Amino acid sequence: MRSASTLSTGLFITCIFLFGVCLTAQDQNDQEQNAKEFPGKGMPPRAAATEYQSQGKAGMVTIGAEFAGHSVPTPGHAYSSEDYIVVEAGLFGPPGAQSMLARGDFSLRVNGKKVASPSEPYELVFHSLKDPEWQPPESKEEKQSATSINTGGGGGGDKLPPIPPKMPFPLRRAMEQHVQKAAMQEGDRPLPQAGLLFFLYRGKTDGIKSLELIYNGAAGTTTLELEP
C-alpha cells in the first residue's frame, strides 16, 4: 500500500503535467489566432492598375497608385500618422510575371521640389501611429476636475496637465502588425503585388498642390502624377 507522501508526490507531478499541457494548448491556440488575423504579409492588390487613381508603365510592369494623405489604410483598419504621408501602390504584369521589389525604388516629389523624398521604412511610422477609434479611459484627475467645475470648486491653477494615457501594449502591437502587413513587401515577388509606401511630411495636406510618385527599379522607370 502506498504511503500518503508517495500519493501526494504523484498527484503533484500529475498537476504539473496537466498544467504544462494546458499552457501548450493555449500557446497553440494563440499561434492559430495570430495566423488567422495575420495570414502572411502584403496588402491584397486591387483588380487592376486602373482601379487606382493614377497609372504608369515601366517596361512590362504597370503601376497603379493613390494618395492617402496622413491616413494609413490597412485591410479592415484605418490608422493615421501626423509625421508621414502614405501612397498605396500596386504593381501588375503579364501572367506569370515576377519582379524584384524594393522600398528604395520609390520616391515622392511634393510641390515640384528638386529633391524627391525617399520612401521610409514602415518601422519609423510606428512612433507617430494613431488609431482614431481608440479613446483613452478618463483619468481620475479629469473626473476630479469635472467635479470641481460642476460644484464651483476652484484652485489647481498651478497644477501641470496630466500625462496623456498610452494605448495598451496589446492594442498598439496589433496596430503595428496591421501596418507591417500592409507595407510594400520587398524581394523577388510574383505579380501583382501591392502595399503602402511612407514618406516623411509633417505639414498639412492642404498645402500640397502637386505630387509625383517616381519609380526607378528593376522593371524600369516611370513617374505617376497623383491627386493631392
Image: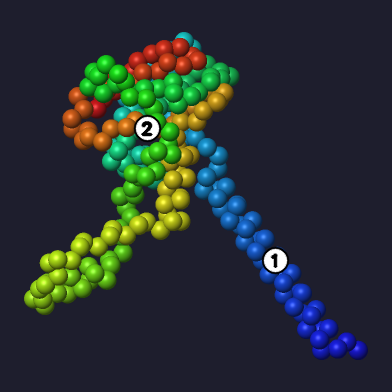
Number of numbered discs on residues:
2
Residue 140 is situated, as x and y percent measured from the top left of the image, at 27, 71
Q: Is residue 142 above or below residue 189?
A: below
For residue 165, the mark is none
Q: Which quarter of the image is occupied by the C terminus?
A: top left
> Residue at the location (70% across, 66% down)?
20
Q: Which quarter of the image is occupied by the N terminus?
A: bottom right
> Residue at the location (62% across, 58% down)?
27
Q: Are marks 1 and 2 in contact (CB under 8 Å)?
A: no
Decide if residue 45 is in sight here.
Answer: no
Mark 2 = which residue?
A: 198
Tell me which corner region of the image, top left, top right, bottom left or bottom right, holds residue 119. Answer: top left
Amino acid type at circle 1 is: Gly
Ranked by sequence position, the earlier of labels 1 and 2 is: 1
Secondary structure at badge 2 equals: strand
Mark 1 = which residue?
A: 20
Q: Is residue 157 left or right of residue 106?
A: left
